[in-house]
Amino acid sequence: SKEFLAMSGREFREVIGKNCRILIEGVPAEEISRSARKDARNYCTTARLRNLSSIPYMMLLQRNARKNGDLFYNYIMLGALRGPNGRILVAGLQIDMGDKVESITVSDQAAAVETHQKNMRICQRAVFGDLNPSAEPGTAGYPGMAPSALGWCSKPEMFEGATELPLVAWPKSRAVMRNHGVTVLRRDGGELPRGATTMSLLPVARHSDGSVSVSIRVEAVSPRWCIEVIEGAFLPFFGFTQLTPTEVDATGLPEQIEFTGKSMCAGGKGEVFCRTKENNFARKNPFEKIGPSEIASTKGTLAEDYAICVGHVMQCVWRAGAVEIFAEGNTIMKAEDTPGEEPVIGAPPAEGAVHALFDCAFAVCQASLMACPER
């Protein structure tokens, strides 16, 4: 585009057929983000997976140079464009954010993302035609965005008798959805332990004892992370929230599952977190200490003889005053509120929908959401 030519300071004949690596020519080696380049390569590789349902867009900040040597920060969006017959192309959109990283504000980033979202639609039309003219950012059919499929929420009868159920993820998540949304894969699962946050599209079932539960089947484990609890393995994170996909759709799930509003989450090394406030928690900075008024916490015990294995069905059950995680029917984690003290775990709400949360974390790098049998 003419905007790219203006940003790069180059002419059309100088960029046609060239790789975007021309934008790091002239950038001092110490100022090039190696992690951004690696993330971009991994994104393109993941987008070519078979049975891919959706992959959220990725935002990268990279130091670039114009032809005359002037340096600037390029805020890049990578998005997967889906065409006929399932063909997928990765589009890279770029915005000049100036020459000083400290001058880039949160509002600047938000405006850049909004511009990228609109331009991604233009790319979709130009490459594949307008497959869904009514699609808007954050809705099913919007290119490069994880489809919310919110229309399914009003048709739970579609899934009666199903053994696997759909999950939904939003752009901030590292979740890649496969097999029509029932399977989640953690992008960069061999390097990053968490962040593939997902939510059940349908409410979880309430059991006769008032408890609620969520089950997943482990589809793959990463050799990068320990699988033996006795050797220090972490469990994936399970949770429940009173928020619905419709309510979450405006902002998406936070990068850490325990930051979700009106939620109770458990996993890791036996940690349990509870947030009673309706909005998602947002850190002001990475080092901010989180007090119990924002997220209360407690800790349970783990079964040291457990090893995470492909094919295992893991289930998290939340009942009054206790949360328990099972694997193949055996308890592998249990936490309970202490009598006489302020409860952390509490009880599932007596009324209203409860949706499951799941972070495909640590050794579990791919999992499918299973229908929970009546208990």
Image (spheres, rainbow, N blue to C red):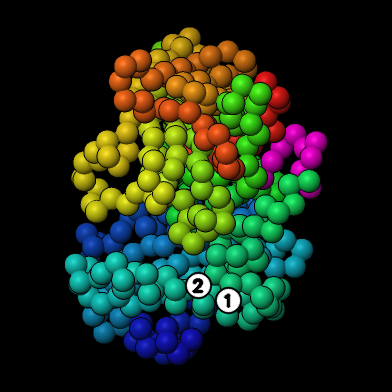
Give the quadrant of the C terminus.
top right
The answer to whether 33 appears left or right of 239 in the picture is left
- What's the magenta region? 158-166
Query: Quick check: 33 above or below 178?
Result: below
Question: Within 10 Å of the Cα at label 1, are there few (<14), some (14-19), or many (20+) other Cα atoms?
Answer: many
Q: Does the residue at mark 1 contact the one at mark 2 (Cβ under 8 Å)?
A: yes
Where's residue 289, x and y in %? 21, 41
Amino acid found under the numbered disc labelled 1: Arg
**Based on the displayed image, in which of its 4 quarters is residue 55 positioned?**
bottom right
Is residue 165 in the magenta section? Answer: yes
Residue at far top of view: 305
Q: Secondary structure at mark 1?
A: helix
- Disc 1 marks which residue? 121
Where's residue 147, x and y in %? 61, 59
- Disc 2 marks which residue? 117
Give the main secondary structure, helix, strand or loop, of the magenta stretch. loop
The answer to whether 228 appears left or right of 145 in the picture is left
